[in-house]
Amino acid sequence: MGTPESASDHDVIVVGGGPAGCSAGVFTARYGLDTVIFDKGSAALPRCAYLENYLGFPAGIGIDDFTALMHAHVSEVGCNIIEERVEAVTRSDAGERFVIETQTGEVHSGKYVIAAAWYDGSYLRGLDDDAMFEQQEHHGESEERFDPDYHDEDGRTPVDRLYVASPAGARSAQAIVVAGHGAHVARCLLEDHRRERGYSGGVAPHYDWLRSDAEFAGEWAERDRWRTWFNSEMEADLPEDRLAELQEAYIDHAFDTHRSDQEVETATERGLRRLVEVIGPDRILNHVDDDLIRERGKELEEVETTNTN
């Protein structure tokens, strides 16, 4: 089908707002790709009574709080979350974009689609039916469902620019594994995106991390050192002007990831503040132990006394 004039255009469309979809969306949005997440439909996470094995929550976390934190995170990095169920994904007539239609008739288009919905994948029918679906036993009944082996371990599929983060067989079994797999699939998408631009070898993969002052000490504080490294990693034979353009863009990005000690401190404080905002300051205060407050007060008094003396 053609792309309707009323369609909203995006770089990445993620179908599914659980751990896999949100994790993928964080990576693509932070990279700078216009990303939208559709979140409505059957999901596995709400079936969990309480989440006790997700790293970073020592005594576990309630499902509603965990979901609120996920959605706040993707919103923070620029993802738009739309509470709509995706009914169909098709190709435009030119084959260059995907066109998705929601249950209420909204139409969106995107260059990439990441399937991250736990349910049966029926919204993908028409893209590659013969290979994409198979007969499976489900609760004692045989039915046609999405084949978890249709995509490779990196989420790539035979359909160009279609990636699958979920369902993913055993990798869809635990929230923390699902989230990690979603991030991995997103990084594979970004690597493919970068290869289209001309990056190759060791500079094709994208690493989303911030660098401290120590990472820019000595020779690494000089752009020429980065140029040398870039040239040693690139494998593609490109025209000199294009190579220089990619090289400088890569180095610009590397220097943009630098954070001073003061910037790290500011980010740390803001991160804690946002966490409190999402959970709710009143809820947090209601669970602060009075004995802990008194103990902390004594520690501060002792520090103040020592500094005075």
Image (spheres, grey):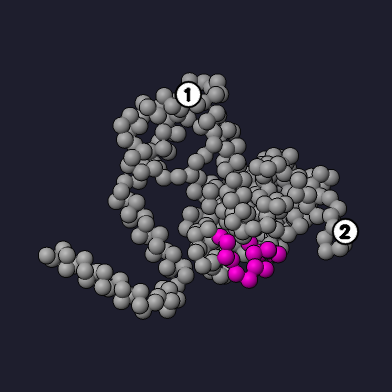
Q: Position of residue 129 (x, y in %)?
A: 82, 47
The residue that disc 1 covers is: 232
| Residue 41 sits inside the magenta stretch | yes
Q: Nearer the viewer, residue 138 or 223?
A: 138
Q: Position of residue 16 (x, y in %)?
A: 65, 58
Relative to 148, 116 lies left or right = left
Q: Considering only vertical position in the picture, is 217 above or below 73?
A: above
Give the residue drawn at x 31%, y 46%: 260
- Quarter the C terminus occupies: bottom left
Q: Residue 219 shows which numbered tag?
A: none
Q: Which residues are magenta?
A: 38-54
Quadrant in the picture for residue 200: top right
Q: Which element type, helix, strand or loop, lies under badge 1?
A: helix
The residue that disc 2 covers is: 142
Q: Position of residue 218 (x, y in %)?
A: 30, 32
Identity, as a three-letter code, of the amino acid under mark 1: Ser
